[in-house]
Amino acid sequence: MKEVIVVVGAGFIGQSIARRVGAGKHLLLANLTEEASLEAAETLANAGFDVSAMAVDISSRQSVQALVDKAQSLGNITGLVHAAGVSPSQAPIDTILKVDLYGTALLLEMFGGVIARGGSGVVISSQSGHRLPALTAEEDRLLAITPTDDLLQLDMLQPARVADTLHAYQLSKRGNSLRVMAEAIRWGHRGARINTISPGIIITPLARDELNGPRGAGYRRMIEACAVGRAGTPDEIGNVASLLMGPDGSFITGSDFLMDGGVTAAYRFGDLAPMPVKQSRPLG
């Protein structure tokens, strides 16, 4: 049977990864709309790849099940690339949590039940998960192992506990890396691997939305202050994803790879770090 790689969120980053891991295999591309999926499929088909397309709503179990069924009808599922999501400027809090957190957990659960031996996957998360202040050990555990359909009921994710869309996004992305670490155990029982990449600012339509949105000045400041001094490209993410999904990454699973040009380093120890609060000396 043909090997099948499922690419969820076949935008610039998803397509970049697909080009590196899809030769000789069947690529099933899935975006929120069929139109976007067909557009991506045409691009890759014109580049010589064997490809098909369908729509998927990753926040719907029924929709993800249809994607799993379609992939299984095409062959053995040996790869999952998850690059779908919404940003803080694109959606309200509840949508961010439902798509970025719950949707990721759903994909990991359902494809983790059918991934073939020797298969691998990569989830595209975000540097934002690394900038969220430390959670408690119990909160980390709950984000990692709470049953998928109970995930959004956690106290820490209720409206009174989530400050704004950025906070929701950071919680979701921290949850992604924790979830992947936990799922790596279950995937390992099937002889498969799963890892996370947490990119910084990568120039895509989503990043352009952010650069032109209410947080645009902050994004530009991150680019200026990071050690590399520029934004990243989808191809740079694709190179690392190819390593993680290929034979040279066979000892890597349950790991998260921060690729942000040094933005997180600048937030902790450089020009983006908050100024320390000076302690006043008591009189006398």
Image (cartoon, rainbow, N blue to C red):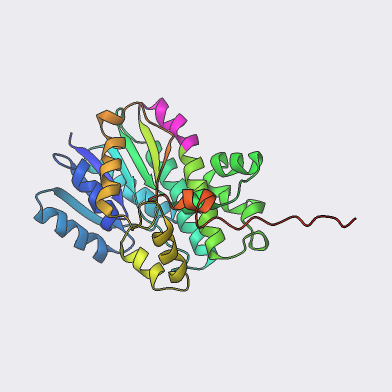
In-image side of 20 versus 278 (left or right): left
The residue closer to the viewer here, 187 or 21, is 21
Q: Main secondary structure of the magenta part?
A: helix
252 vs 42: above or below: above
The residue closer to the viewer here, 256 or 24, is 256
Q: Which residue lies furthest to the front in this view?
A: 284
The reply to whether residue 102 is in sight is: no
Residue at coordinates 40% horizontally, 54% vertically from top-left?
200
Q: In which quarter of the image is the N terminus?
A: top left
Q: Which residue lies furthest to the right in this view?
A: 284
Q: Where is residue 263 in the image (x, y as percent from the top left)?
A: 44, 53
Highlighted magenta segment, given as a residue range: 181-191
Q: Where is residue 227 in the image (x, y as percent from the top left)?
A: 39, 51
The residue closer to the viewer here, 262 or 187, is 262
The reply to whether residue 211 is in sight is: yes
* Residue 228 on the magenta segment: no
In-image side of 218 versus 259 (left or right): right
Number of numbered discs on residues = 0
Q: Where is residue 49 in the image (x, y as percent from the top left)?
A: 13, 48
Q: Quadrant of residue 38?
A: bottom left
Q: Quadrant of the C terminus?
A: bottom right
Q: In which quarter of the image is residue 250?
A: top left
Residue at coordinates 60% horizontally, 39% vertically from top-left?
141
In-image side of 235 versus 126 (left or right): left
Residue at coordinates 9% horizontally, 49% vertically from top-left?
48
Q: Where is residue 50 in the image (x, y as percent from the top left)?
A: 13, 47
The residue closer to the viewer here, 129 or 104, is 129
46 vs 123: above or below: below
